[in-house]
Amino acid sequence: MSRSLFAVAVAALMLGATVGSVAAESVDLSGVVVIVNASQGVTTISTAELTKLFLKKSTKWENGTAVVPVDQAPNTLPRCTFTDKVLGKTPSAVNSYWQQQVFSGAGVPPEILAGDEAVVAFVKQNVGAVGYVSAEAKLDGVKALTVTQ
């Protein structure tokens, strides 16, 4: 009986390790980097948490700082890639979501900034800011996050 119990325990541990390693896998954002202010304590973030931040369903970082998400201009490669790979939506679906939020008085979309340099500058100056830029962007004064499933 104790051998059976031991085998079950080992199998459960192996399954847990497998599930844990899958959950921590990095997401390929195809040339887009998610950035935060250099003073933020976070280094890794899930696509689910990013979705909550960018749809403003979550408004504070773990340390209590207000989250300030910023978007890039519509139809740019970083915006389309981020919308697809992180939010799992089409740009028109995200636009419809924000139209409903604004119409109902429930919220307003993130500020839209024109290009990588503007996003980096904004994130550098705002402690709670989170944005995304092209992988080629200079990340002076900001921190790139590892994005996981």
Image (cartoon, rainbow, N blue to C red):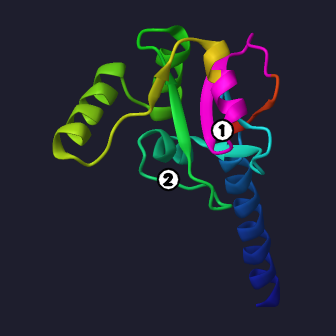
Give the percent coordinates (x, y) of residue 98: 29, 34
Report whether 134 appears left or right of 7. Answer: left
Residue bearing mark 1: 126
Question: Where in the figure is residue 31, as x and y percent of width and height?
Answer: 67, 15
Residue at point 82%, 23% (across, down): 140
Instruction: Mark 1 or mark 2: name the one nearer the start of the chain.
Output: 2
Q: In this rendering, would 50 be left or right of 126?
A: left
In the image, residue 113 above or below residue 58: above
Residue 72: % across, % down: 51, 18
Instruction: Between residue 15 and residue 91, name the one nearer to us.
Output: 91
Q: For mark 1, give the secondary structure.
A: loop
Q: Residue at x 25, y 41 (%)?
A: 101
CA distance separating discs 1 and 2: 14 Å
In the picture, which quadrant includes the N terminus? bottom right
Residue 22 lies, in percent from the top left, at 68, 46
Q: Amino acid at mark 1?
A: Asn
Q: Residue at x 63, y 55 (%)?
A: 65
Q: Residue furthest left?
A: 103
Q: Is residue 118 above or below residue 100?
A: above
Q: Identify the disc placed on residue 59.
A: 2
Q: Amino acid at mark 2?
A: Thr
Helix, strand or loop for disc 2: loop
The span shown in magenta is 120-139
Q: Quadrant of residue 127?
A: top right
Residue 63 sits inside the magenta stretch: no
Query: Which tag is nearer the camera, tag 1 or tag 2?
Result: 1
For the residue pair 123 and 61, the one nearer the viewer reads as 123
Asked whether disc 1 touches disc 2, contact meaning CB atoms under 8 Å apart, the reply is: no
